[in-house]
C-alpha cells in the first residue's frame, strides 16, 4: 500500500499520488495518460494532474489497482 509520507515531491497536491516504491513501469501512464507522467531524470512516475472528470477518476483507480508494487495511493491531500 502506498504511503503518503513517502510520496514524490513532483506529485501535484490532491487525492492521488505516487510514492517512492515506484519502479517506473509506466503502467499508470498507460491507464491514465493525462494524469501520470514519467520523471526521466530520476526514473519514476508521478501525478502531473489530479483527475477532474469521472472518466479520469476511473482511469486513476485503474492505474492504482494495476500498479505492480502498490506505489499509487488515493489518500493524499484534499484538493
Image (tube, helix red, strand yellow):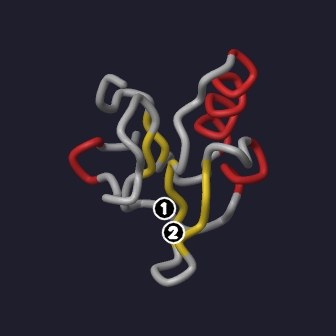
Residue 41 horizontal side relative to residue 12, left or right? right
**Does residue 9 lie above or below 57 as drawn?**
below
Q: Nearer the viewer, residue 60 or 13?
A: 13
Q: Residue at x 41, y 29 (%)?
A: 15
Whether residue 78 is situated above or below residue 33 in the rendered picture:
above
13 sits to left or right of 22:
left
- Identity of the residue furthest to the top in this view: 54
Residue drawn at (41%, 45%), measured in percent from left and top? 12
In-front residue for pair 71/31: 31
Q: Earlier in the sequence, mark 2 or mark 1?
A: 1
Residue corresponding to mark 2: 44
Residue 13 % position (x, y): 35, 39
Instruction: Name the spot of residue 60 as percent of width and height, x first.
Output: 63, 33
Tell me: 58 left or right of 50.
right
* Relative to 21, residue 75 above or below: above
Residue at 31%, 58% (x, y): give it.
9
Residue 73 point in image, percent of width and height: 43, 37
Separation of disc 2 and disc 1 at Cα? 6 Å
Nearer the observer: mark 2 or 1; the answer is 2
Residue 14 figure quarter? top left
Residue that carries the numbered disc 1 in the rendered image = 22
Q: In the figure, 41 relative to 71: above or below?
A: below
Q: Sort mark 1 into few (<14), some (14-19) or many (20+) by Cα contacts within 10 Å.
A: many
The quadrant the N terminus occupies is top left
Does the CB distance between marks 2 and 1 fall below 8 Å?
yes
Q: Residue 79 location in percent, x, y?
A: 36, 25
Amino acid at each position: 500500500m502506498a504511503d503518503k509520507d513517502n510520496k514524490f515531491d513532483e506529485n501535484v497536491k490532491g487525492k492521488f499520488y505516487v510514492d517512492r516504491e515506484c519502479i517506473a513501469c509506466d503502467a499508470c501512464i498507460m491507464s491514465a495518460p493525462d494524469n501520470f507522467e514519467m520523471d526521466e531524470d530520476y526514473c519514476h512516475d508521478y501525478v502531473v494532474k489530479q483527475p477532474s472528470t469521472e472518466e479520469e477518476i476511473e482511469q486513476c483507480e485503474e492505474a492504482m489497482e494495476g500498479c505492480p508494487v502498490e506505489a499509487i495511493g488515493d489518500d493524499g491531500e484534499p484538493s
